[in-house]
Amino acid sequence: MVYRSLVPQGFSSYPMHWHEEMELIYVEKGSMLLTVDGETYEAKAEDLLLISPLSLHSMEEVKGKKAVYYNVLFHPSWLQHEGAEDDMGKLLWSPLKNGEGSFLVRPRLSQEKEEKARQLVKELIALGSRKEEEGMSFLIKGTLFALLYYVKEAFVKAKAPKKNLAQMATMKALSAYIQDTLGEHISLEDAASFTGYSTSYFTKFFKSYTGVSFVAYRTLLRLEKAKALLAEGEETGLAIAESLGFENYSYFIRTFKKTYEITPKQYQLLVMGRKRQLISSESYE
């Protein structure tokens, strides 16, 4: 999967998350901040960054700057022979899954290999728009195999499992807890209690992994959920704001507009209008 993203247009930060897919980030222009497993990197134009499966990561803007970047995601199993533990599984995916190794976020490659890897990512981006073509998966897989060859030096095996695995497990459990309680009034103290940390330690711990405060992170998750519900068109903005625990509707509108530069109602009308156009064009065909 290939996604084109803009920061801060649409959002000023993307909250902490993780997934089983390998992720490649290519910055086309501008600069942004990427936090991976508690360490923050500034990514600039032409930078290529690697995010290992199951790594906690988030993105945010560099104040006063904008960035255009691409996300390329693929599941390791897509490149493995079904039911077989091939070289790729032994050398890469098994160590990644067991916490015995990871890719360097900012790969240290020779100039030649770095340029080749960057070119292959650009090819993947171009192929992403043609993924529905018959047999296109052959080209995409071949390009991914070639890319992994050039960045394999960025994979580092650990002498022992990461020391922060326990903290990462705590963050993952906390993230699920926050998602499950978006409509409830969960305080900073409640979240700290969930982890077993003191409020002061939790505040520093949380920001080191997400790049933002607990309140800002939870608010952004609620707004993203609100966007999804508005796009479905089955509920009013007022009902959605109430279901997600916003203080009042006026606050919800102000926060939504500040984040997305459009009101909830305008966003819902825009999405529903696009859906109607799509249905109309399909009917015409």
Image (spheres, helix red, strand yellow):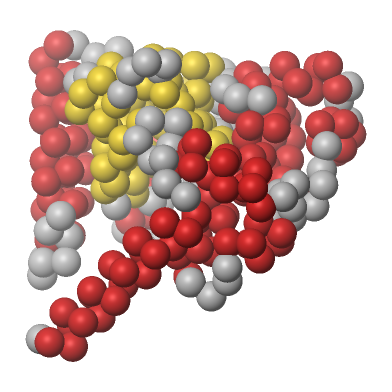
Residue 172, picture quadrant: top right
Quadrant the C terminus occupies? bottom left
Asked if one can make out residue 165 in the rendered structure from this viewpoint, the answer is no
The residue positioned 37% from the left and 69% from the top of the image is 272
Q: Nearer the viewer, residue 244 or 45?
A: 244
The residue positioned 41% from the left and 40% from the top of the image is 261
Q: Position of residue 177 (x, y in %)?
A: 75, 48
Determine whether, in the image, residue 38 is placed left or right of residue 147: right
Q: Position of residue 238 (x, y in %)?
A: 64, 62
The residue positioned 17% from the left and 44% from the top of the image is 124
Q: Nearer the viewer, residue 257 or 26?
A: 257
Q: Position of residue 30 (x, y in %)?
A: 25, 20
The residue positioned 11% from the left and 41% from the top of the image is 123
Residue 83, picture quadrant: bottom left
Residue 125, picture quadrant: top left
Q: Position of residue 242 (x, y in %)?
A: 71, 59
